[in-house]
Image (tube, grey):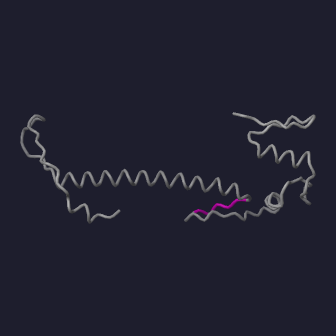
Amino acid sequence: MKSYRCSYRNCKQTYTNQYNLRRHISINHHKVRFTCKTCQKKLCSAQALRDHAHCHTGEKPYACKFPGCTKRYRQGSQLSYHKKKHARQLSEKVEVFAELKLTFLLRHESKEIYEAPKGPYSVNHAVLPPLRPNSNLKSLKF
C-alpha cells in the first residue's frame, strides 16, 4: 500500500491517501480557519467543525432511512459507510431470490413436461420428449 509522507521539516506523519495528507498540512502547517471552542481542536472546514461539535453534544443527526433501521451517526461519512452495508445485503438477497426463482421455474416446468414412467428401467431406457413451451409459466409473477 502506498503511503504519503508530510514534507515539512521535523514532521514524520504518514497517511494512506493524499486527502488525509492535505488535511494534515492545512491543519498543522498552514493557517487554521476553524477552532473548536470547547477543546481547541483545529479543523480545516466549517463542516468538519460542525461534525466535530457532535462529539461534545452527543448529537447524532445523520439517520439511516433504510426501512426498519434505526441507526444514527455523528458524521455523514459514517452514515455513507453504513449505507454500503445495506446495499451489500440487498444485492445478496437479490442473488438468492434469483436462484430460488430459477429453481422453482425449473421444477415447475419439469413436472409439467416430464413424468418418470413406473417400472424397473435403467438409464439406457430413458428417452425424453422434445421441449415444448409451457403456457403455465407465463402466468407466474415474481
Please identify the quadrant where the C terminus is shown.
Answer: bottom left
Q: Is residue 133 left or right of residue 122?
A: right
Coordinates of residue 107 in the picture (x, y in percent): 25, 52
Q: Is residue 97 left or right of residue 81?
A: left
Q: Is residue 62 left or right of residue 112?
A: right
In this view, the residue in front, 22 or 101, is 22
- Number of numbered discs present? 0
Q: Residue at x 90, y 36 (%)?
A: 11
Q: Residue at x 66, y 57 (%)?
A: 79
Coordinates of residue 7 in the picture (x, y in percent): 87, 36
Residue furthest to the left in view is 119
Coordinates of residue 123 in the picture (x, y in percent): 13, 35
> Within the magenta stretch, is there residue 121?
no
Location of residue 122 (image quadrant): top left
Magenta span covers which residues?
A: 69-73
In this view, the residue in front, 24 or 102, is 24
- Magenta residues: mostly which secondary structure? loop
Q: Residue at x 25, y 60 (%)?
A: 137
Q: Is residue 93 left or right of residue 119?
A: right
Please identify the quadrant where the N terminus is shown.
Answer: top right
Coordinates of residue 59 in the picture (x, y in percent): 76, 64
